[in-house]
Structure formats: structure tokens, C-alpha cells
Amino acid sequence: MKYFPPAIFAVAAIFAAILLLGSASAQAEKIVVTDFALNSAQKNSKQLPNGWALKVWHGRADVQLIQDENRHAKVLRMRSEKASVSIYREVKIDPKKFPVLSWKWKVTKLPKGADARNVESDDQAAGIYVVFPRFPSFINSQLIGYVWETSVPEGTILRSRKNPMVHYIVVRSGVDNLEKWITEKRNVMDDYRKVFGSEAPKVGGIALMIDTDDTLTNAESYFASVEFKGDAPRVSVAEDYVHFAKAADPIAWTYE
């Protein structure tokens, strides 16, 4: 996954003007950031999911809502061929009330030879990034990225060499559990404390990403839902359905 330079947050502020502010539906026990199964677009559509903004860093976007016949519901499919693509949504969440980030994802193809420890091969098949804006300066904003790596061992925490405010947590690695839907649960409060050494501020945004422009390979991944919950995290479960460090661009996220 790539480096998010400070200007990401200026871009996020622009996105915020066109997004559905406060559109995440709150319930007593959780906040649903997105459930792609409930999207109103037709079952196979290149229409951007409701409330999300697309950014293509490199190459061509291949982001589509499709009907997953095994789940009997729509999901988001992200494909990358020598490209870097993300979608972003503004959210406003207090992690003290909803500390657990839960999401469903599936990876079917990893970028060959990718390894986030090396700038030249810093690609991932899938990543979900939590943005912590720190006002009044966007420069001080922080990110935690939960990624599915090709080579870096699970549990590894990587700090960007270009922006110390960006950290990656490797949730999955390698070919184990490819082709399976997996429900992940991470306590964002605990992870923030582990990474940054203090209490987590409020969450301001979520990004979903796929990236293969360094290795010049292909990858494919899927997302079904993203939620914040108030319960304690449980062990991630694999569901048996059958089948970021670059030089900063002064005005945009950098994916070269």
C-alpha cells in the first residue's frame, strides 16, 4: 500500500463537500459505514457505491458492484492491473463508543512479488484505512491501514518511511484463505494506542484500496460491508463460501 502524503486530508475535505455527510446509519450497538448489499445500483454496475468518492492514482480504475451468487447479494469488486485505486468516504465516529472496526473481505489474487517492506514492491491486494483527522492542521492527521499482504507476516506493523503518521497493520498475508469471505474485527482503540501511544481521536474517514503499480502485476479483492461496533472483537472467521511509501505530491495522494 502506498504513502498518503499530508495533502490527502485536503482532498478529503473536498470529498466531504460532495459526500453524504453523516449518512452512516447509527444503531444502538453499531454504525454501518457501508453495506454494499443494500446499494440501490443494479446488480452489476460501475456506478460508484452510495457515499463514496473514487480516486485513481495510477492506471485505470476497475471498481464495480457485482452480484455474488454464493452470498446472494451485491459486493464491491476491486481489480488492479498495474494500477493504484481507492475509494474514500467521510465518516464521523467516536471510537470510545464504537471501538471495533468490522469488515468482510475476500481476496482472490495477490500481487506477485509484493512486499510492503520495500518501496519498490509496496503493493497490496486489499486494504482498509482508518483516517484520524487532527485539526486545525491536516498535516498532523494520522492513518492506520489494515492490509492483506503478499509477503509480510501477519501481525506486522509497518511505519511509513516518508510519513510517520501512516502505519500499516498486516491482518492477512499470503495465499491462506484466498477465495474465502472473511469477517475481520479489530479494536481500533487498542491498535491506535499500540501504534501512536495515546488515546484515539475521532475517526474522520474510511478508504478501501487496491494497488499493483510497483510490481506491475494483477490483483483482485472484494468487500461486502464495513461497520463500527461497541462490542469486544472476536477472532476473525473465514466463511466457507465456495468459491502506502512514495514521495509526496503537493496537491494529491501520491501513487507513482
Image (cartoon, helix red, strand yellow):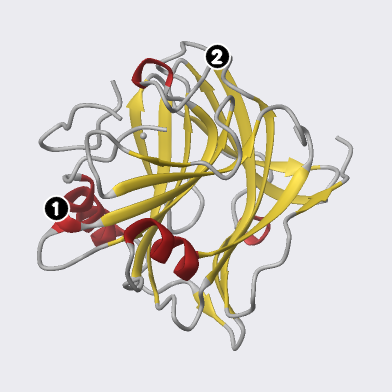
* Residue for point 10% across, 67% down: 136
Q: Nearer the viewer, residue 154 or 91?
A: 154
User: Mark 2, residues whose alpha carbon is within 10 Å: few (<14), some, or many (≥20)?
Assistant: some
Whole-angstrom CA distance, mark 1 to mark 2, is 32 Å
On the picture, is 88 further left or further right than 181? left
Residue type marked 2: Gly
What element does badge 1 sit on?
A: helix
Read off the residue under disc 2: 113
Q: Residue 177 appears in which quarter of the rendering?
A: top right
* Residue for point 49% across, 23% down: 115
In x, y percent, where is residue 38?
A: 65, 61
Most extreme residue toward the bottom, as rendered? 28
Q: Is residue 81 above or below residue 48?
A: above
On the picture, is 202 further left or further right than 46? left
What element does badge 2 sit on?
A: loop
In x, y percent, where is residue 180?
A: 79, 40
Q: Residue 155 appears in which quarter of the rendering?
A: top right
* Residue for point 36% across, 34% down: 244
* Residue for point 33% across, 64% down: 197
First in sequence, mark 1 or 2: give its number.
2
* Label 1 close to label 2 by CB (< 8 Å): no
On the picture, is 48 further left or further right than 71? left
In x, y percent, where is residue 24?
A: 48, 72
Question: Can residue 47 be seen in the rendering of this structure?
Answer: no
Read off the residue under disc 1: 139
Q: Nearer the viewer, residue 149 or 87?
A: 149
On the picture, is 138 further left or further right than 88? left
Residue type marked 1: Ile
The quadrant in which the C terminus is found is: top left
User: Mark 1, residues whose alpha carbon is within 10 Å: few (<14), some, or many (≥20)?
Assistant: some
Q: Is residue 3 above or below residue 23?
A: above
